[in-house]
Image (cartoon, helix red, strand yellow):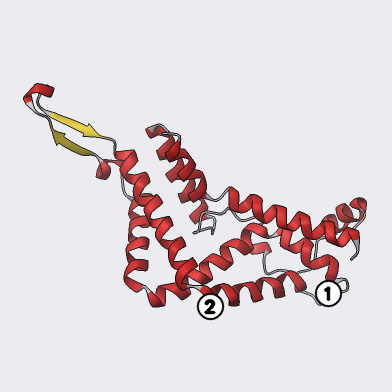
Amino acid sequence: VNPTVAMAWLEALAEWHAKVSEAWLLVALRATVSAAREEAMEEHCAGLLQMVLAGAPVGVSPSQPWNDFLSDLRPPEHPQERVPSNLKRFAGNYINLIFCAAILTGSCMRPLLFTLCVVLQVVALLAPPEMFDVHLMQTKSAGGGFRSVGGPWIRYLMAVTAQIGLMSISLFCGQRGILVAVLLVLLHALFRARPWTVMAKEKLKGY
């Protein structure tokens, strides 16, 4: 095995691992464990909204703009170099593609769960803040009146629940979608030409 090609594959795997580790759901769950403040909950939800608007509904930020994803497709001259390079360069895009294909496939098997998760996510990300304010009546011993229960936490828990539901659909019901998406990913990595700047950097590294 060519050592430089093997190194390129290891770098691609490392980039995929880094992207998955930075997924919104994993970051949000770590924040829950660390008992984050309500302000942080709002920031997490705002961050997920920005990812969704950027074309990352599964909460993994794209590595490259989507309008760059399908441009400049050409037969490869050096496939052993192009494939790992593109797998690294488009890691975030590929992860979104795989999970979206899995979710869409799984939604055919669990349409009610899919619909519930989508509605939860839409409400959590787009509903006005006052919608999540809950006021509970206090006993006289506690001072009477009403006590406000943290709205940001309710929004945040709805978003986390929706993401967990969508990930469950993809992993347990979307295996066919995953297989098709992996095939498309490999085809794209094979035919997507690398920019000359990327090729120059790889030459400097010895690839």
Percent of width and height locating residue 162: 38, 56
Residue at x 34% of width, y 50% of height = 158
Please say if the residues under marks 1 and 2 sit with CB atoms less than 8 Å apart: no
Residue 137 location in percent, x, y?
A: 11, 33
Write the residue at 63% across / 57% down: 92
- SS class of the residue under badge 2? helix
* Residue at 31% from the left image edge and 44% from the top image edge: 154
- Residue at mark 1 to residue at mark 2: CA–CA distance: 28 Å
Amino acid carrying mark 2 in the image: Arg
Of helix, strand and loop, which one carries label 1? Answer: loop
Specify which label sits upstream in the sequence, 1 or 2: 1
In front of the other: 73 or 19: 19
Which residue position is annotated with label 1? Answer: 76
Quarter holding residue 45: top left
Taking 13 as reference, is 34 left or right? left
Left or right of residue 193: residue 34: left
Closer to viewer: mark 1 or mark 2? 2
Using the rendered view, name the quadrant where residue 183 is placed.
bottom right
Quarter occupied by residue 149: top left
Q: Residues within 10 Å of mark 2 (few under 14, many from 20)?
A: some
Image coordinates for residue 22, horizontal then vertical, percent: 58, 47
Question: Observer-nearest residue: 206 or 133?
Answer: 206
Depth check: give the residue in front, 163 or 194: 163
In the drawing, does residue 125 fall left or right of residue 148?
A: right
Look at 71% across and 68% down and name the residue there. 71
Q: Which residue is mark 2?
A: 176
